[in-house]
Amino acid sequence: DIQMTQSPSSVPASVGDRVTITCRASQGLSSWLAWYQQKPGTAPKLLIYAASSLQSGVPSRFSGSGSGTTFTLTISSLQPEDFATYFCQQTQSFPRTFGPGTKVHLK
Amino acid sequence: QVQLEQSGAEVKKPGASVKVSCKASEFTFNGDYLHWVRQAPGQGLEWMGWIDPNTGDTGSAQKFQGRVTMTRDTSINTAYMELSRLRSDDTGVYFCARESSGHYDAFDIWGQGTMVTVSS
């Protein structure tokens, strides 16, 4: 199974900050990597697929980069609605595994 | 609106089974797989398994093998996940999600989640 890790596990941030989250895979994924945002009590929402492709309707302040085993999600200027937990997921093989999550919270 | 609509919350006793439904609205099951994901209270996302709505073929994570059954009824665009021999640590929110081949197999549509509580 492919193991996914994320760092940091928690990010204290303020509105307007640039936030970067890193996701690492135990095996090479090429670009088979997705990022999701989840707010309490709601289902995850797809933000980025294919490592760097922005899902339709997602603000352009979100961006993804990387390939192989190391990936990043960047929020260029944090907005109030962006305080949430972010998960990466590998979509290359079964079992589809998720990272443990990174919580972006108010500093 | 394209969405997945899940059945309501369930409370079950240890050892019982639970069956959660997931109905597609405004789209038809086609070649895209349907997945099930679990989230224990305050925890991360745990992938459980998948079903091919066209063929009925399924696959599941090793920890759920022998306890999870995934089925579908294409006539009503609905998929089901049944988990048997429930334990207290099965408590959590269960999501269905559509895998999109056009999105590098990412999960582009999610159900709203079904809370399952296992308690004696």
Image (cartoon, coloured by chain):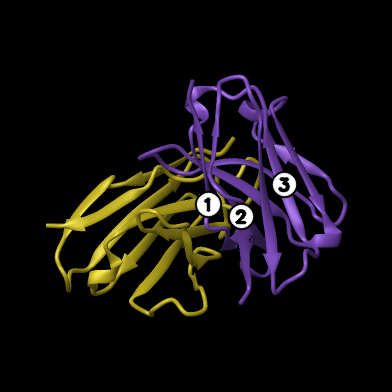
Chain colours: A yellow, B purple
Q: Residue at x 61, y 51 (%)?
A: B7
Q: Residue at x 61, y 55 (%)?
A: B6
- Measured as percent of width and height from the top left, residue A78 is found at 23, 71
Q: Which chain letter goes with mark 3?
A: B
- Measured as percent of width and height from the top left, residue B78 is found at 75, 56
- Measured as percent of width and height from the top left, residue B46 is found at 52, 40
Q: Residues within 10 Å of mark 2 (few under 14, many from 20)?
A: many
Determine which quarter of the picture holds residue B104: bottom right
Q: Residue at x 37, y 55 (%)?
A: A86
Considering only vertical position in the picture, is B87 above or below B94? above
Q: Nearer the viewer, residue A95 or B51?
A: B51
Q: Which residue is mark 3?
A: B80
Q: Is A15 positioned to the left or the right of B1 in the image?
A: left
Q: Which residue is mark 2?
A: B6
Real-space Cα separation, disc 2 to disc 1, in angstroms: 6 Å
Q: Which residue is mark 1?
A: B113
